[in-house]
Image (cartoon, rainbow, N blue to C red):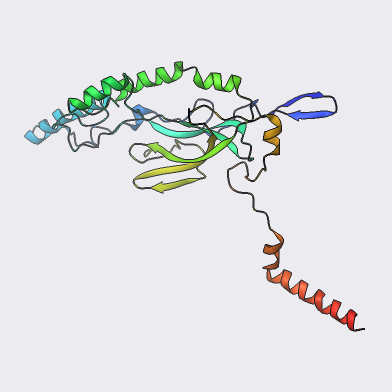
Amino acid sequence: MSTVPQQGSETRTSMLPSIVPSGIGFFGSPYNPANAMLTPQQIGVEVGDSMGSVINAVKGVGFYSDQIGFGAPSTGLTAGMPLKPLGVNYFIKTGVKCSNGADMWQYMKGITEGNALGEKTKRVMEEMGLPPLKGLAPGMIEDAQNGLNPAPLMSALFGSGYPQCKQVTLQVGDAYGRIADPDTGENWIGEQDGVARSGNGYTQTRWVQDTDRSGNPVNLTRDQWISEPKTFNPNGTPIKKESFENMLTHPSTILVVGVLCLLALGLVKK
C-alpha cells in the first residue's frame, strides 16, 4: 500500500496498489499451450507400417486439427480421444484490500469459452451438430477481444479504490484437471491456499470484487471502507477472536477461576 500526502493532522493510506504482488507475477500463469498439448505418443500415434499404425496416424491428424479448431472431437474419427480445450483458469492478486481485510483477487479465464465469433455462430454450430469453437485459433480471438475490452481498465480508473468483496469458489487449472505441468511440475496457478479437489479437477476459494445485479463493481467510500469490521486475514481466512465464553471453556481458565472463588469465599468467612 502507498501513503497519500497528509491532509491537516490526518495521515491516509491508499488502498490502490503501488505494486501488484502475485505468486505468478504481472504476466499471469506460466502455462504454455504448446507444452500442455498432448504428444502423438500420448494419443496413440507411433511409427509403424501396420494398418493400425496408419489408422492411428490419420486419427492423430484429426486430433490436432480439432485441437486447433474445436478443442473437442468434431467427427467419428476423433470421437473418444482425450480432446479438451487448452488454457488454464487461475486467480491473480490485485494488490487491493477488501473492506473485510482480505486480499482481493481477479479470476482469469484462460480456458477458451467458445464465444469468440458471437452467440449466433455458436448456435449455428450447435444446430449443425458441431461442438463450440474452443480450439487454439478461436482462443486467440477471445484473448484479443479480452485484451481490447476497456471495461476492467475503466473500472480500475473510476473505482473508489475501496472495494466491497464477495467470496467465490471457482475452477482452477486446465480442462484436464491439472494445476501444474505434468512433466516439469511447474505450478500454473500460483499460491495454492484454498485449493480443493473437486471431481476430476480443482477449485479455489478467493475474495473478488463484488458486483450488483447489472454486473457493475460495488465500491465503497473511504469512510465506509474503514468502518467495515476487518474480520479476515489477508489470505482470506477468518480472524479468530476468543470471546469470554470461549475462555471459560479452557481447563486452565476454569482452574484459575475456581481458585479465586475459593480465596474470595475464605475472605468472606473471616
With 59 as the anchor, is 95 left or right in this view?
right
Q: Position of residue 239 (x, y in %)?
A: 64, 49
Q: Is residue 184 visible?
A: no
In the image, residue 37 above or below residue 149: below
Residue 202 found in image quarter: top left
Is residue 47 rendered to the left or right of residue 108? left
Q: Is residue 224 left or right of residue 29?
A: right
Q: Closer to the camera, 20 or 130?
A: 130
Which residue occupies 40% across, 21% down?
143
Q: Is residue 159 left or right of residue 268?
A: left
Q: Position of residue 201 (x, y in %)?
A: 37, 43
Foreground of the two, 8 or 189: 8
Q: Is residue 55 or residue 94 the one in the foreground? A: 94
Residue 75 sits in quarter: top left
Residue 153: name its quadrant. top right
Quarter of the picture containing the N terminus is top right
Residue furthest to the bottom = 269
- Percent from the top left, x then y, of residue 260? 82, 74
Q: Residue at x 60, y 29 (%)?
A: 219
Task: Tell which residue pokes out farthest to the right in this image.
Answer: 270
Can residue 209 be seen in the rendering of this structure? yes
Q: Residue at x 69, y 30 (%)?
A: 222
Q: Is residue 158 above or below residue 82?
A: above
Outermost front residue:
213
